[in-house]
Image (cartoon, grey):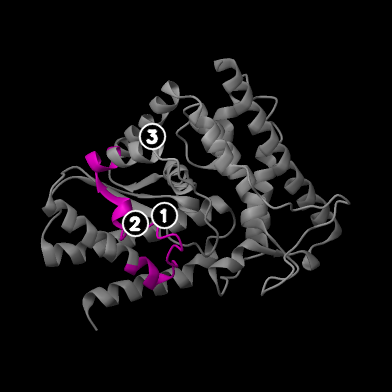
């Protein structure tokens, strides 16, 4: 067995043996994920150094998705990218190799591959600083659904290794674009406001009706996403660069325009995180398992609380839509 494989295996075993001790809160759990991912990165970088030498230039490795927002569950898939200083073939080859090693290493220790391929092994998410600036410009000018989706994914980027400023500058590029073309906010709105109903007209749950999660509520899409997407969009509008939903809510609530409108949602989101953690204390067999809540196992009080949170998520979407539309109306 190679030293590298032993390093990955050692990290996997340590992670499996210790993650259960870090589930008293979502914050503690995510600090643990950060430690694991940073250590994995060091192992991957050392392997590439052995084969190809030291990095040819400065770089940063960032995470996105629930990792970027500091909202990972017990089992979390991969969402990450690389940005590096030099724009040349040597740097491109080096960091693509590093991206592949990071991605395969994370998979080995228990982080499933991203279904959307939002990973450093994908050249789309592994670019030089100059190439990233061009890429963001292309996404902003493109009319496709995917381009908007990629921009929103990138806005959750949080640097784990390297300097934060390179990612901050790219986010500022989006802010400057919106200042010049405020109607771009409407394109972001259209992309983020489509969700299935979670609660029916008679205040009944609308759970999955087929498949392995029949009778369960999809907390990821019906619970978290209405809050995450709405608060992200308002954060983009107000140039809030915090990445966690709770931190974004805190920043927005400090602004006079939002203080009253957002006051109840911070508690709702904290409860969502708590319910997910409470009902998935043990490591789930599959990544999707951590997002589904079996309503039959909920007590009467829990059912009432979760229904209210789900309905409040819909209210938050409507509130966000009204803010964006009012802003655009004022631009006329």
Magenta stretch holds residue 114: yes
Question: In the rendered view, does 263 fall on the left or right side of 290?
Answer: right
Residue with the mark numbered 1 = 34
Mark pair 3, 2: CA separation: 23 Å
Can you see residue 255?
no
Q: Position of residue 73 (x, y in %)?
A: 55, 59
How many residues crowd mark 2 within 10 Å: few (<14), some (14–19), many (20+)? some
Along the line of sight, which residue is nearer the eye, 39 or 305?
305
Residue with the mark numbered 2 = 38
- Identify the magenta region: 104-133
Q: Secondary structure at mark 3?
A: helix
Quadrant placement of the C terminus? top right
Label for residue 248? none
Mark pair 3, 1: CA separation: 22 Å
Question: In the rendered view, does 30 fall on the left or right side of 329?
Answer: left
Label for residue 171? 3
How many residues crowd mark 1 within 10 Å: few (<14), some (14–19), many (20+)? some
Along the line of sight, which residue is nearer the eye, 1 or 185?
185
Q: Secondary structure at mark 1?
A: helix
Do the CB atoms of the residues marked 2 and 1 lie less than 8 Å apart? yes
Question: In the rendered view, does 135 fall on the left or right side of 323?
Answer: left
Magenta stretch holds residue 221: no
Quadrant placement of the N terminus? bottom left
Q: Residue lying farthest front? A: 143
Mark pair 2, 1: CA separation: 6 Å
Q: Position of residue 291 (x, y in %)?
A: 62, 62
Along the line of sight, which residue is nearer the eye, 254 or 156?
156
Q: Position of residue 101 (x, y in %)?
A: 27, 65
Q: In the rendered image, which quarter is residue 133 located in?
A: top left
Q: Is 2 placed above or below 329 here?
A: below
Q: Residue lying farthest bottom? A: 1
Residue found 52% across the figure and 53% down from its top: 28
């Amino acid at each position: 067995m190679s030293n590298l494989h032993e390093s990955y295996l050692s990290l996997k075993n340590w992670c499996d043996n210790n993650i259960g001790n870090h589930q008293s809160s979502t914050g503690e759990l995510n600090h643990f994920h950060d430690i694991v991912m940073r250590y994995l990165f060091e192992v991957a970088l050392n392997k590439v150094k052995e084969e190809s030498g030291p990095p040819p230039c400065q770089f940063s490795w960032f995470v996105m998705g629930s990792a970027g927002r500091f909202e990972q569950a017990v089992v979390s898939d991969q969402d990450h990218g690389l940005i590096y200083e030099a724009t040349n073939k040597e740097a491109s080859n080096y960091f693509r190799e590093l991206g592949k090693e990071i991605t395969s290493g994370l998979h080995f220790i228990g982080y499933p591959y991203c279904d959307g391929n939002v990973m450093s092994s994908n050249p789309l998410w592994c670019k030089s600083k100059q190439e990233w600036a061009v890429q963001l410009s292309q996404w902003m000018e493109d009319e496709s659904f995917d381009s908007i989706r990629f921009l929103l994914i990138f806005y959750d980027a949080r640097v784990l290794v390297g300097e934060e400023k390179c990612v901050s500058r790219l986010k500022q590029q989006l802010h400057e674009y919106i200042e010049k073309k405020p109607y771009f906010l409407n394109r972001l709105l259209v992309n983020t406001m489509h969700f299935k109903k979670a609660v029916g007209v008679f205040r009944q749950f609308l759970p999955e009706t087929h498949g392995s999660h029949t009778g369960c509520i999809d907390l990821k899409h019906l619970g978290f996403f209405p809050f995450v997407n709405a608060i992200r969009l308002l954060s983009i509008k107000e140039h809030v660069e915090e990445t966690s939903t709770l931190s974004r809510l805190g920043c927005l609530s400090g602004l006079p325009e939002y203080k009253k409108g957002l006051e109840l949602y911070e508690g709702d989101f904290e409860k969502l995180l708590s319910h997910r953690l409470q009902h998935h204390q043990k490591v789930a067999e599959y990544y999707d398992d951590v997002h589904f809540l079996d309503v039959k196992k909920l007590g009467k009080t829990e059912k009432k609380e979760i229904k209210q949170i789900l309905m409040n998520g819909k209210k938050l979407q409507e509130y966000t839509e009204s803010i964006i539309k009012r802003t655009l109306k004022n631009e006329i």
